[in-house]
Image (cartoon, helix red, strand yellow):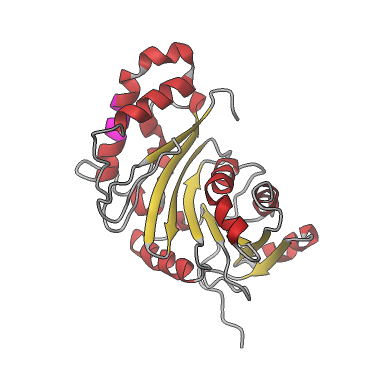
């Protein structure tokens, strides 16, 4: 008997091009792993009421590795049935959940806007379950964005645990970097309070942004780059992060479970970028 899917259905809210920042980051950072894989497979977990994000993920990952295949996995069977007409070579839609019901281990699992509806104490278990399904060298990317994808924060994890947290945004939409706090992943959003590392990071990032105001005349991107260098520059330790949550700020990098010497990272799109 087939295992019942693990998890609960999301609201299903989705939009074309919503996950473009995450997709581009994955193609750039994880592209070498896709190219090394014998048969690279990526999963769009919980793609929602329409299949747009899975269709777009296939197109973007194939710029990095043309052999990549994408499987969209949804726990709602009606959503799977609605997506079936969009199947093509390299793109399939499957009924399932966190168990990842595929005959092969994927090189990538992307779960965007999935865990926000869960309790914080459930996140570590879900992360562990998903990472256990990855192929060697695989990556789990889990995060949250706004409805049109202009503000996005995600965690990248391997079987050993979280590696980075990335803050990605259309810079023209920001007043200050801490505006991204509303899109922190579930593992971090309730920790954005005084005394917690993510709160200290965003506070320091805001200060660096303010200090970089002279660069504004050169454009928001140059101001962002200057703020990133100031907040995580040479001679400064990256912020410590709690054992249950990671961190990263252009794309720069950060280390989450314990102090590792890695950087938080931030990725900013140009002020004119969508």
- Residue 54, image x, y percentages: 66, 54
Horizontal side of 10 relative to 86 (left or right) equals left
The quarter of the image holding the C terminus is top right
On screen, 77 above or below 236? below
Q: Residue at x 62, y 66 (%)?
A: 76
Horizontal side of 210 relative to 146 (left or right) equals left
Q: Is residue 249 visible?
A: no
Q: Residue at x 36, y 26 (%)?
A: 227
The quarter of the image holding the N terminus is bottom right
- Residue 90, image x, y percentages: 74, 61
State the predominant SS element of the stretch in magenta. helix
On screen, 63 above or below 12? above
Is 119 covered by the magenta stretch? no
Horizontal side of 89 relative to 143 (left or right) equals right
The image shows a total of numbered marks equal to: 0
Picture quadrant of residue 250: top left
Q: As drawn, which residue projects farthest toward the left?
A: 195
Q: Is residue 115 visible?
A: yes
Q: Residue at x 52, y 41 (%)?
A: 146
Q: Nearer the viewer, residue 187 or 24?
A: 24
- Residue 138, image x, y percentages: 51, 62
Q: As drawn, which residue projects farthest toward the front?
A: 36
- Residue 120, image x, y percentages: 35, 59
Magenta residues, start to end:
202-207
């Amino acid at each position: 008997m087939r295992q019942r899917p693990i998890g609960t259905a999301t609201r299903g809210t989705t939009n074309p091009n919503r996950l473009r920042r995450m997709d581009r980051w994955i193609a750039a950072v994880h592209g070498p792993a896709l190219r090394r894989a014998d048969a690279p497979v990526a999963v769009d977990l919980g793609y929602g009421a329409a299949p747009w994000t899975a269709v777009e993920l296939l197109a973007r990952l194939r710029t990095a590795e043309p052999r990549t295949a994408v499987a969209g996995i949804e726990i709602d069977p009606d959503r799977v049935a609605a997506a079936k007409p969009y199947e093509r070579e390299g793109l399939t839609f499957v009924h399932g959940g966190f168990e990842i019901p595929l005959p092969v281990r994927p090189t990538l699992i992307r779960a965007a806007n999935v865990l926000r509806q869960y309790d914080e104490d459930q996140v570590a278990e879900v992360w562990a379950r998903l990472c256990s399904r990855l192929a060697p060298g695989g990556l789990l990317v889990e995060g949250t964005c706004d409805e049109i994808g202009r503000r996005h924060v995600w965690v990248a994890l391997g079987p050993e645990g979280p590696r980075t947290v990335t803050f990605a945004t259309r810079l023209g939409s920001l007043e200050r970097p801490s505006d991204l706090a509303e899109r922190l992943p579930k593992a971090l959003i309730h920790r954005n309070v005084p005394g917690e590392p993510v709160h200290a990071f965003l506070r320091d990032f805001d200060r660096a942004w303010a200090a970089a105001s002279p660069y504004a005349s050169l454009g928001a991107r140059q101001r962002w780059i200057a703020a990133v260098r100031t907040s995580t520059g040479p001679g400064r330790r990256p912020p410590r992060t709690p054992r249950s949550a990671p961190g990263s700020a252009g794309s720069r990098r950060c280390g989450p479970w314990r102090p590792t010497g890695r950087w938080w990272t931030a990725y900013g799109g140009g002020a004119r970028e969508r």
